[in-house]
Amino acid sequence: MTIKDLAARTGYSVGTVSRVLNNHPHASKKARQAIMQVVEESGFQLNENARQLKQQHATSVLVVVKGTSNELFAELLTKIQQLMAQTSYPLIVDYLDEDANEVLRAVQLCREKKPLGILFLGGNSENFCNDFDKIDIPCVLVTNDAGGHVFANLSSVSTDDRQASRCAIDALVAMGHRKFAVVGGDRERSDTSILRYEGCLQSFREHGMEFDEDLDYQGVRYSYQDGYQATRALLDAGRKFTALFAAADVMAIGAIRALRDAGLRVPEDVSVMGFDGLPLGGYLVPQLSTVCQSVQLLAERSVSILTDAIENGGKPQKETVPFVVMQRESTRHIGE
Amino acid sequence: MTIKDLAARTGYSVGTVSRVLNNHPHASKKARQAIMQVVEESGFQLNENARQLKQQHATSVLVVVKGTSNELFAELLTKIQQLMAQTSYPLIVDYLDEDANEVLRAVQLCREKKPLGILFLGGNSENFCNDFDKIDIPCVLVTNDAGGHVFANLSSVSTDDRQASRCAIDALVAMGHRKFAVVGGDRERSDTSILRYEGCLQSFREHGMEFDEDLDYQGVRYSYQDGYQATRALLDAGRKFTALFAAADVMAIGAIRALRDAGLRVPEDVSVMGFDGLPLGGYLVPQLSTVCQSVQLLAERSVSILTDAIENGGKPQKETVPFVVMQRESTRHIGE
DNA sequence: TTGTACGCGTTATCAA
DNA sequence: TTGATAACGCGTACAA
């Protein structure tokens, strides 16, 4: 079934059929009705390949997800899909390994799929520096700040990671904690990890607290297992701390298990604070105290900025969305 | 950059260029070298749209994922991606809402993307009955049994859900439990839920135990929240039980929290057994006892069966993969 | 308002 | 082994 058949069946020409199908002007009401009638009946659909070959670009929006088992991104993606469902842009989702180069992948996908815009869920600054100039469609970096870049087609929507982790530490300090351990990401390669770490340091400094950057920090991957092992390493090294800050909820969960395996109770012996605000955290025993990112806002603003850029050539925005430090059961006040 | 340019640059014709690019015979070594040389230099890539328009089908495999926040499927997908990366088939992943019709969606995607085969992660028997005859490419239903269907292009790879949940209950009975509650899925609409429930009933019957199908069973969605609320409902209704079986780990986690909020300890007061074997379960306090599905085997067999069907016209298979009942910390022996 | 005809980049058929 | 050329299904300038 092609527009040719459709033309034959309705007595109109392919030109008219095409115009009707694309809602172009210059088609009579009568033609419109007659053609749409047959379309409904037959469930006809335009051939996307022919269409894109002709138009030289798709009508779709691409989502590049970095890291394949990331709860936060999964949630974000769900929200984004809901929002995009209200537009006419089909969504193409592409998953990458955590340490793959998302920008090069995007360049390739641009050639293949010719999307109208790209949403990056996670990303590495270095990759953007090196190769983003090869991309010329509107893009939004979600959960990462693009502040350092000057590209005319790159926006970003993120939580202020530095500020957020600083607040988290501040909150723990306010509860009387003075000795900390931090389980975070790779300080060399992950922008997010660097910012969250810097936030910690800033708070430590302001409160005049000691922190051994090598011994009290563990830079690992964002996973249950790495959170577990990092905490174990801290304990094995004999580090003493009353509070542990994990730069992601999944690591916090691994950390809690490691503490418990070492005979320590949470929060009685050690307070644990996570980062992200995954729904899961609210069902754990103890409920996880955490820095809650607003998935809703992150998704809404990203989609809004991207569609605006696509449709109206909107200028790139660098936005930050609010966060909340949630004190639940895995942290507690300790005596002076 | 098109094959025309490539032809011009190398002095050969588009025909020869196309043959070289597709590894067809009848192209001289010399031509091959000259052309590939320029391809390397320029990073040329064939236009996928033109290609598929001409060939009338893509070279890709489609994965239809039912339910957008399903940990098990997320894991499965990761494994599948790894396995497929070793083949030449690009993967197209499509997510659906839990109660959308995956078969109709697949029919639509077949028209749009013309894939070589489809992997269904989750699916509803009824939908397959009604509309699967509209699909004529090889398909594999993963985690669900297609035993009831006779389609010549539908395989399945799954855990024997009935048997598995029966074993889970058997294990709890062996630990001395006699009063049960079950938090499962919708018995009306989800095949998996029905099978897991039937497995429970079978074990109850064999051990001559009482179970009130209406009062001791909660049919809800597979989520933390629904697990929590279902358990709460059981407690509010005054049901007494020493063991709770949840048909999914996520529900078990919600259940444990609900028990604890009601002042009950796990496993001292109530033993809780989940289903799926998510990695997360091993890091919880208490570690979750569960029926562990083999994600590895599920993925391997599915991919293997699908590629065999695509490449060699292999006949449809209905396979079952082994499971393990893992006794960890959320279940315990109780006295007679 | 409608119809005709060309070209998008590729593959495949047929001659050479 | 190669080259010319006709499709594939669609959008659109141009003509009517």
Image (cartoon, coloured by chain):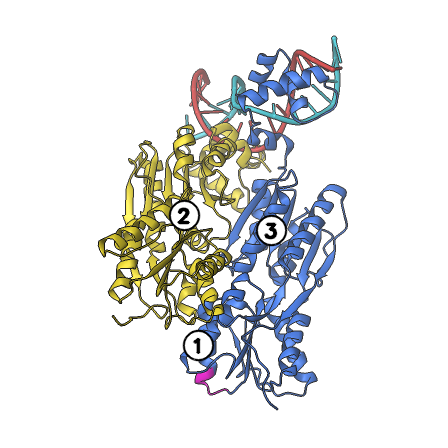
Chain colours: A blue, B yellow, C red, D cyan
Q: Position of residue B65 (x, y in %)?
A: 46, 45
Q: Which chain contains the residue that carries disc 2?
A: B
Q: Is residue A157 left or right of residue A283?
A: right
Q: Which mark is residue A258?
A: 1
Q: In the rendered image, is residue B105 in sight?
A: yes
Q: Which mark is residue A140?
A: none
Closest to the observer, A293 or B334: B334
Whether discs 3 and 1 lie on one chain: the answer is yes
Q: Position of residue A61 (x, y in %)?
A: 62, 44
* Image quadrant assignment for residue A233: bottom left
- Packing grade of label 2 (10 A; few <14, some 14-19, many >=20) is some
Specify the segment rendered in magenta. Answer: A235-239
Q: Decide whether the magenta segment is chiefly helix, strand or loop.
A: loop
Callout count: 3
Q: Is residue B194 left or right of residue D10?
A: left
CA–CA distance in space, label 3 to label 1:
33 Å
> With respect to residue B135, does A304 lie above or below?
below
Q: Residue flagged by tag 3: what amino acid is it?
A: Lys
- Packing grade of label 3 (10 A; few <14, some 14-19, many >=20) is some
Q: Which chain contains the residue that carries disc 3?
A: A
Residue bearing mark 3: A79
| Local secondary structure at mark 2 | helix
- Packing grade of label 1 (10 A; few <14, some 14-19, many >=20) is many
CA–CA distance in space, label 2 to label 3:
28 Å
* Image quadrant assignment for residue A89: top right
* A249 drawn magenta: no
Kindly indicate whether the residue at mark 3 contacts the one at mark 2 (C-beta within 8 angstroms): no
CA–CA distance in space, label 2 to label 1:
35 Å
Q: Position of residue B159 (x, y in %)?
A: 32, 50
> With respect to residue B71, does A49 lie above or below?
above
Residue bearing mark 2: B84
